[in-house]
Structure formats: C-alpha cells, structure tokens
Image: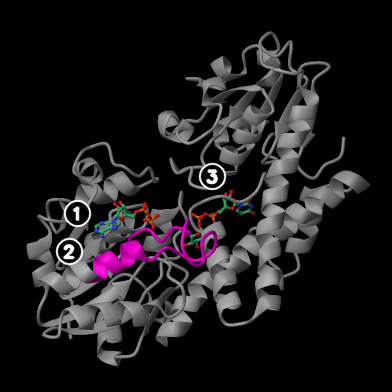
Amino acid sequence: MKINKIVCIGAGYVGGPTMAVIADRCPHVDVTVIDMNEVRIAAWNSSSLPVYEPGLAEVVQRARGRNLKFLNHIDGVQALKEADAIFISVNTPTKTHGPGAGKASDLSYVESCARFIAQHVSGQKIVIEKSTMPVRTAELIKEILTHNNSQAKFDILSNPEFLAEGTAIRDLEKPERVLIGGENSEAVQALVDIYAQWVDPRLIITTGLWSAELSKLAANAFLAQRVSSINSMSAVCEKTGANIDEVAKVIGTDSRVGPKFLKASVGFGGSCFKKDVLSLIYICESYALPEVAHYWQQVIEINEWQKKRFAQKIIESVPPHGTVAILGLAFKKETNDFRESASIDIVQHLLQAGLKVISYDPKVNFTEFAKGLQKAENLKSASSIAVAINGVHAVAILTEWPEFASINWQEFAPQLKNCNLIYDGRNIVPVDAPLPPKLNFQRIGVSG
Ligand code: UDX
Ligand code: ADP
C-alpha cells in the first residue's frame, strides 16, 4: 500500500496546518483539503489565511498551487474518489443536547464525513481519524462506511494530532512523537511512510486503534490536570504568602515532574482541554467507572473556579458600573483562536456584574468574540493598549502576548489615574517593572 493522494476533510486549526506541512514535506504527494465552509476555503486560497499561526503563511505559500489545494467539499469529490488516504479533521464539540449533553463529544460531523466518504468512493481507502475522538469511534466510522458502501474496502487508522496552537508549525515539523493506531499493518505502514519523509522513524509510535484514540484524550487530560494542579496551588499561595512562580520552579526542577505546564494562569482554554476531559469523564461514566469520572471532573471544577475567583477579585476592586480593560482575548499567545478562552467567562462575569469592559487583542476578531455574550452592549473593542486602558478602573491581562509583558506602565500614568488595580492573570509583567504610584498590582498566586 502506498499513499500518493491525500484528502483531508476539515480545513480548521488542525486540518489546515497539518496538511500544509504534509504537502510541504512530501512534494510528490497530492494533498487536497476540503471543507463545507466556503468562506473558510476562500480564505485558505487568499493571502489572508483563516488561521493565524507563526510560520503557516510561508508553508502554505510554498505548497499551495503545487501539491496543496483547498476546495469546497462539492468540488473536492473528484479528489476524494482518487484519494488513497482520507483524513477526517472536523470538529467534535461537546454535545449540547441528547444523551450525554454537556459531556460527550458530538460526533455528528464525523458521522456525516463517513457518510460523505461512503457515498463517493470505491476501491481501497485508508480512512484516518485526525480529530480527537472518543475511544472506539473507529468502530462507528467503520460501521457507517461499510453499511453505506459494500463495494469499497476501508482500513481505519487513528492518527491524533498533538500540535498546540501558536506553535503548530514547529510541532508539526519537529514533533516529539507521531502516533498511528490501526489493525492492518500495511495501512499503518503506508501512513508511517508519509511521516517518515521528515520525522525520525524512532519517533513514530504505532499502537492498537483503541490505545491511539485513548492516548490522545489521556495526554490532554494529563496536561489540563497540571494546569489545574498549579492553579489550585496558586490559591493556596495567595492565602499563605507563598509565591506560585517560586513554588512552580521548585516543583519543576524535579526531573520526575519537569518544568513545563506549571504556569499559573486565569485558567486553561482552547478547543481541546475542556472538551477532551469532559469526553473522558463521559467515557468513564459509560463504562461504570464513577470514581475515575469524579477524579477528572475536579480538573474542570478547578478551572471554572479559577476563572470565577479572578473575575470576583476585579469586581470587588472597582466602583459599581466601573470600567475594566481586558488585555488579551485569545486562549493563549500567538493564535487568533478564542475557543473556550478564559476571557469569555471572565468578560461575561464582569458584564453580568454591571461593569463596562473595553478589550484589546492583537489577533482575535472582536465581532466574533462578542457574539453570544450577554450584556454585550457594555463591551467595546480598542485598537491599542493605550486606547483600552484610558480612564479605566482596573486592567486585567488575560493572554500572555509579549507586548503586554513590556508595557511601560509609568508612561501610562495619566491614562491610569482612576485605576485601582492591574491584575496580571498570566504573571508576565516583570516583578521589578516600574509602576505609577498608588496603583495596586496583583499577580496570580502571589498575595498582596
Ligand atoms: C493542547 C495540547 O497541548 C496539544 O498537545 C493538543 O494537540 C491540543 O490541546 P492547545 O490547546 O493548542 O494544545 O494549547 P496548550 O498550549 O496546551 O494550552 C492550553 C491552555 O492551557 C491555554 O489556555 C494555556 O494558556 C493554558 N496553560 C498552558 C496554562 O495556563 N499554563 C500552562 O503552564 C500551560
Ligand atoms: P479543529 O480545531 O479541530 O481543526 P475547526 O472547527 O477549526 O476544528 O475545523 C473543523 C472544520 O471542519 C470546520 O471548518 C468545518 O466547516 C469543517 N467540517 C465539519 N464537518 C464537515 C463536513 N461534513 N464536511 C466538510 N467539512 C466539515
């Protein structure tokens, strides 16, 4: 088995960058990315890509028009018919209704992909789960494929993506590992051969299907757990006078723990952590493992609590109907993504408390962000830091954009004359940064 032609269904934050790197690194392989969202496809074909990722534009520039195409899913049918391998990289959000609502992953997009594939293809196809899926989803995909198409032969692989947004290109070009789960060793090898074009084969881990599916959920759950662990400790620090950055440094120098993912924050966000931990919880409940479900539930509870207590501190520090500047809406730096960002809940808490909010983020689309918020009439967008903080009663840093770390606060003293509190929700402002007089400065996990 050899993969010469690839189709990826889903041109989102995962599908777009992943396929761009595969096309870039495998110039002899034809890669077509298809999506039912025509606006998104048009953006992938333009100079203004729908995803902001450092280095992405250059990779797309090199491969697009050579062996990388972006098509709407109707125009993509021919490519689908010809493909040797089809990646499914669509969204799997948390279900909002029906059995498992609020926890289970909504697999309707995955199911519709499987039906779309079954409707159009014949011959032998490798179908690859790229989106994070609950364990045993491959079974469901296979069922839909074979039930709707008895002619073609399908091999299902699980190849979950470990890229983190903001570092997606680096993570794809130099992954710590690539995971491929499957039953048919020839199909597994065909996909190994693709990655081996640029990844050291020793970093390509092959496992059974269910292990691959569960490993992705487990990996994200462990990472989210670390953030909740350090955030829970940040509250203890604030009560006891200990300093969370010092504590994190000490914990992280133990090589058994390691230094990464120990940065206290306003709470984790992003499209993966909450959704995947909830999905894991639902799986545990489904398999009658309530103790395990309860254990992981606490990771979510601490995260929700961290956001709430951060918002509460701001609310208590400003006058009724006062104004708060929010610096950063993205769920982390170097991305325009604000899915599940802590900023959503924090802004919502402030608005609900009757405060006015003025926000600034260098990359996030404000109109999209404001959609779905209640009392959004009291939320405004600013074009710069200077405009955002002018005349406000409090400033909160919610994303660790480097430009927020280097703000010269003293220079802004006139704009900050009504301001009681600067709350650094990312602990990025240097401890020795000169501040205007009489301004309270607070860091996460540091009392005072
Ligand atoms: C995550 C996983 O890291 C990645 O492997 C997986 O493929 C997808 O999910 P992502 O959500 O893009 O990636 O970003 P990540 O860097 O993991 O950050 C998630 C959230 O945790 C962010 O809001 C981030 O600010 C927060 N975080 C992370 C902390 O608050 N403290 C930390 O120490 C690390
Ligand atoms: P992720 O972060 O996992 O990449 P996104 O929401 O950014 O998630 O991207 C998923 C993409 O999948 C969206 O652009 C959506 O339009 C697309 N999509 C979902 N279902 C289908 C489908 N059945 N056919 C084609 N595209 C789909």
Badge 1 amino acid:
Ala
| CA–CA distance in space, label 2 to label 1 | 8 Å
Residue at screen point 81% across, 55% down: 247
> Would you place residue 336 above or below residue 438 in this image?
below
For marks 2 and 3 on the same chain, the one whose residue lies earlier in the sequence:
2
Magenta span contains residue 95: yes
Ligand 1 shows up in the quarter that is: bottom right
For marks 1 and 3 on the same chain, the one whose residue lies earlier in the sequence:
1
Residue 55 % position (x, y): 35, 47
Residue 147 % position (x, y): 22, 82
> Would you place residue 12 above or below residue 360 in this image?
below
> Would you place residue 161 above or below residue 170 in this image?
below
Q: Which residues are magenta?
A: 89-114
**Which residue is under mark 2?**
27
Picture quadrant where residue 177 is located: bottom left
**Which residue is under mark 3?**
331
Residue at screen point 19% across, 42% down: 42
Residue at screen point 71% across, 12% down: 413
- Dot 3 falls on a residue whose secondary structure is loop
Residue 362 % position (x, y): 47, 30
Lateral position of residue 179 relative to residue 230, left or right: left
- Labels 2 & 1 near each other (Cβ < 8 A): yes
- Dot 1 falls on a residue whose secondary structure is helix
Magenta span contains residue 439: no
Q: Quadrant of the C terminus?
A: top right
**Which residue is under mark 1?**
63
| CA–CA distance in space, label 1 to label 3 | 29 Å
Badge 2 amino acid:
Pro
Mark 3 CB lies closer than 8 A to ligand 1 = yes
Asked if residue 132 can be seen in this view, the reply is: yes
| CA–CA distance in space, label 2 to label 3 | 34 Å
